[in-house]
Each structure stands twice: as structure tokens, then as C-alpha cells.
Image: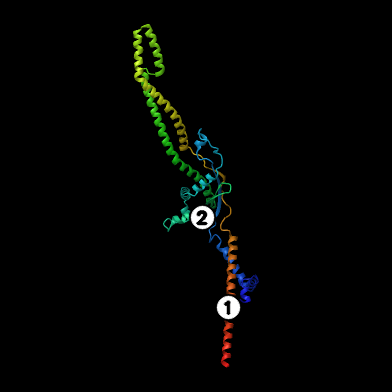
Amino acid sequence: MDEQSRNTYSSKYLCKLLVEYRKPLLIILAAAAVLAVIFSSRHFITPLYKSTTIIYPTSSNSISKVLISTTYQSEKDIMNFGEDEQTEQMLQVLNSNRVRDKVISRFNLMEHYDIRPDSKYPYTRLNKLYDSRIKFRRTEYNAVKITVLDSDAALSARIANEIAEIFDSTMNQMQKEVAVEAFRIVEQEYNTLVAEMNMLEDSLNTLRKLGVFDYESQVEMLSQQLAVELGKGNNQGIKNIQEQLDVLAEYGGASYAINERLDNDRLQLSLVKSKYEEAKVDATEFIPHKFVVTSAFQAERKAYPVRWIIVVVTVLSTLLLLIFCIVAYDRSKDFFRREAETEAATDRKGKHLEKE
């Protein structure tokens, strides 16, 4: 390998080439910089404005368990910020189709992004634009950062702030779907118990009209009176007491059983009623599921494109390409020169042999 080949990519060799071709290099780099400035203007690239909202999830999603329930024991407070689990849940909901569809519908993003519904793959293009311009990221402090890029600075801020509210409404909607069904089941059980207790009370009222109030105490009292009347020999009194004892004998067992069942139902009703009240609160009341730490505001300067970065990258890329081209050109020139010298030497040698 000759000296030229060994030093093809040495710094000295490259500097020599750059100095040798400095004029065309400077002209081409200047032209690349000017073109980069022109093509990075708003006439060719739509400027985008960035707005961000930072929100924290709440630590609990059930207001009834935290504020009403006396049996639910937890260290979670409704005013505390959520931890890893709640942050992950928030990210999953924000990235769900429920939130995406609401944002697209509320701000008519298909029209705003200039996508025609009758074009080819409109929803695929819409989703790609949505994913590239609306992003959700978990911060190092377990918060969620909502970032929105849009050509309209005011709309960018509105979307970022509205997404936080859409998250709240989506969480409530998802939980209400379960809470309403749970409330229906508990309400049905509660109403069944109340209806049963009313029926038992009606039966007791019927027995009371027959003179059956408290079976055990009445039997004890009548037995004592019967003994007294027997001692007196009062046949009419004995007959009256015996009639009452006969009524107690016939209906006393039913009265006792009904009272026992009522006691059990009252205990069950107290438990079901607490669940009923909790389920009713969960099905009818709303609580925020997020704390807004930073609200989005209208950006004053565009976030994209950053013109100086485009110019620098363009100039550096052009420079590298030019260096490659110059080296290739110089090597090819050297190669053809050596080929020409070899061919000339061969011709001279052939002529010399012919002369001999």
C-alpha cells in the first residue's frame, strides 16, 4: 500500500483536501445554510406551539369508603397524592380510546388536522398525528405530564387543560358503570329485606289483635293468675285464663318465630343499609381524580421547528457528504492517473521490445 493510500483518511490529508477545495466547499455550505433557513420557514414547515399540564392522581377512587364507611380501614386519604399504582392507572386511562375519542370529537381534530374523511386511511393518519402531537409522560415525582403540540397556540393550551378534565369525567364514567350496577344489586337486597320485615310486622299486628304480644311473659303471668284463680275456686276466671292460654298455645309459637326472624332481619338490614348508603354515594356523587399542579397557558414562541438546529444539522450533514465526495473524487483521480502511467509504461516497454 502506497503512502497516499495509507494516509487517505488521516487528518493531514483531509485538511489538505479541505484547503484545496475550500472555495466550492464554502459556496455549497453557504447555499445549504440558506436553503435550510428558507425551508425551515413557516411557508414550508408548519410551526407548532407547545403547552403542558402536570397533574397528580388522587390516592383513593372511592369517596364512600374513605369518608362514610366505618368498617373500611386504610391509611389512604382523599387529599393525598397517589403513588405508583395510581400513576400507572392514570397513564393507562389517558392513553385509552375513551380519552382519545373524546379529545378528537370535542376539538374536531380531523378537520383541524386537515384530514378528509373520504381520503385513504383517514383514521390511521389521524391517530398517528394525535400520537405525535399529544403525549403523556410520567415524571420522576409520580406526576403525569401532558404535552400538546399544535399549530394554534391557544388551542394547544385548551387541549392540554381539557384533557385533564376529560380524564376526570372518564374515570367517573368508568366507575359509575360499576357503581350503578352495584347500587342496583344492594338496593334490591335492601328493598327485599324491608318488604319482608313489613310483612312480618303485619303478621305480628294480626297476632296482637288476637291477644298475643309476648309469648313467654304472657304465659308466665297467666300461669300465675291461673294458680290464684284455682286457689279461689273461681271457675269463670279459670275459664277466661284458660281461653287466653289456648290462644297462646295456638299462636305463640308463630309469634316467637316471627320475632326471632325479625331480630335477624333487623341485624341484616343494618349491615345492608350501610352498604346501601355507600353504594348510593358511589353511584350518585362525583369526586376529582386528579390534582392539577401546573395548568397549560398559551405559548408565546413556537417549539417546532427550531431553525438553528435545522441549519446546523443541514450544514454538518452537507459537510460530511462533501468530504466523502471530495475524498472519492481525489482517490478516483489518483487511480486513473496511476492507470494511465501504467498503460504508458506498458506501451513504452512494448515499443522497446519491438525495436529489439
Residue 135, horizontal then vertical, whole percent: 52, 52
Along the line of sight, the residue nearer the viewer: 223 or 105: 223
Q: Of the numbered discs in the image, which one, if any, rests on residue 33?
A: none
For the C terminus, the quadrant is: bottom right
Kindly state the secondary structure of the residue where label 1 is placed: helix
Which image quarter holds the N terminus? bottom right
Task: Please give the name of the residue rendered at 38% of the width and 25% of the height, measured from the top-left corner.
Answer: 200
Q: Is residue 284 above or below residue 90?
A: above
Q: Which residue is mark 1?
A: 335
Q: Which residue matches tag 2?
A: 132
CA gap between label 2 and label 1 equals 49 Å
Along the viewing direction, whichever of 190 and 105 lies nearer the viewer: 190
Residue lying furthest right: 12
Q: Nearer the viewer, mark 2 or mark 1?
A: 1
**Residue at the extreme bottom:** 356
Judge left or right: residue 196 versus residue 316. left
Amino acid type, callout 2: Ser
Q: Position of residue 114 (x, y in %)?
A: 47, 56
